[in-house]
Amino acid sequence: DREAILRRQALRESTARTYARSLPIVPVRARGLTIEGADGRRYLDCLSGAGSLALGHNHPVVLEAVRAVLDSGAPLHVLDLATPVKDHFTTELFSTLPAGLAERARIQFCGPAGTDAVEAALKLAKAATGRSGILAFTGAYHGMTAGALGVSAGPGPLATDVGVTRLPYPYDYRCPFGVGGEQGARLAAAWAESLVTDPRGGIEPPAAMIVEPVQGEGGVIPAPDDWLRRMRRLTERHGIPLIADEVQTGVGRTGAFWAVEHSGVVPDVMVLSKAIGGSLPLAVVVYDQDLDLWPRGAHAGTFRGNQLAMAAGAATLKFVRENALAERAGQLGRRMATALRRLAAAHRCVGDVRGRGLMLGVELVDPESVLPDGTAPQPPAPALAAAVQRACLDRGLIVELGGRHDSVIRLLPPLTTTDEQAEAVLDRLADALAEAER
Ligand code: PMP
């Protein structure tokens, strides 16, 4: 039963577990937005496999695609050999890529996780340019392997130094320059430009710039379109490959099929995982053919041919495309953001509401230290955020925390979420906020 399973796993599993510690549930069944626990309780799951469930749990088209492969007698494990399943997945994926990259794209299948595709992208850029340094951003998250950790914002001591230079990511609410808005974004761009163009800027010409079009783990911070365009122009002028990490933002989540499309930026390299596997493990790096200069075997790995994941992924990509779920995510996301802003107006502990599409963040602050003139930003409130997360769980709502200070409530509901379900999510969150604030 639930308690016994939780007790046993707490004893057996490593102390490094994160989700399991803040979400003491034992899921036994799931469909769409809903998870059912071993205790019979039902939860609305706005964690969505850390954003990987574009169609929610166990969507019929995904199950059907997986069953079709299982029933066909096709091999499930063939390393990186060509198969009809892989051919179908690749065709489907390429049909969604931004114009400008689609017709020039090459793909490398990677190990099963996003972090492995990040490693591949960094190696690819180094091989193609013959350079080694990487430009990355404050607050970034790219994964847990050494190179990916190195270009992420933390945890520092466990990362390998990959010669990373960190540039300020424009963060309106906690602007590194103390001004926010467009001006903050302009200053962030100017910093990057001066560093790259100043011959005595202190950096060697880098092998790549890696950027999230919306920072997810970093606190749900959308990159301003104009800033991203300036980063594209800068990297283009200096022959620096631009790597867009769309592991979390991809497959319609932000209101466009790929989040770079909001700005019209065409990256040289895209790192893709999570939703492209339709809830099964799959990661790829897609890049401009001109960069295809890495040596044979430069990125090997036994599990690069997961047929079930490719089938599930192809079915997901097709369903999102044919049902215009990116547009749907954009519309529903805007409505949810409006409702969250109303909530913010009613609660002094809500410092900021932001996001793009169905990637939403609510930053909680210490209401006792609100400045008399009401100006932001206030001190972050991680303990309050944890209390809201617990209160949400009590009300059958699963949310995740993130951000620089673990004080941002993150909502990543499936793109298939109905209006009624969105209402229920917002109601429960409002209740939880009211209780935790008391
Ligand atoms: N990049 C981004 C933007 C991510 O959000 C994540 C995971 N949250 C990763 C990379 C790493 O993916 P994985 O956990 O599958 O290694």
Image (spheres, grey):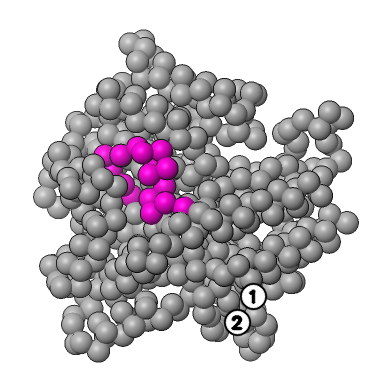
Q: Residue at x 53, y 56 (%)?
A: 331
- Residues marked 2 and 1 touching at CB (< 8 Å): yes
Looking at the picture, does residue 271 appear above or below residue 185?
A: below
Q: Tell me the number on the disc at residue 4.
A: none
Specify the amino acid type for callout 1.
Tyr
Q: Residue 271 vs residue 102: left or right?
A: right
Label 1 crowd (10 A; few <14 / some 14-19 / many >=20): many
Q: Which mark is residue 43?
A: 1
The secondary element bearing badge 2 is classed as: strand
The image quarter in which residue 100 lies: top left
Q: Give me the residue at 63% from left, 62% from top.
A: 399
From this viewpoint, is residue 132 visible?
no
Secondary element under disc 1, as helix, strand or loop, is strand
- Name the side, left or right, on which 260 lies relative to 71: right
Where's residue 65, x and y in %? 31, 79
Magenta span includes 351: no
Quadrant location, the N terminus: bottom right
Q: Position of residue 348 (x, y in %)?
A: 82, 45
For the residue pair 99 and 140, the one nearer the viewer reads as: 99
Whole-angstrom CA distance, mark 2 to mark 1, is 6 Å
Q: Is mark 1 within 8 Å of ligand 1?
A: no
The residue depicted at 20 percent of the width and 62 percent of the height is 91
Judging by the rendered image, the residue that carries numbered circle 2 is 36
Looking at the rendering, the stretch of residues picked out in magenta corresponds to 255-271
Q: Position of residue 243 (x, y in %)?
A: 33, 40
Nearer the N terminus, badge 2 or badge 1? 2
Nearer to us in this view, 260 or 286 = 260
| Amino acid found under the numbered disc labelled 2 | Glu
| Residue 120: % across, % down | 27, 48
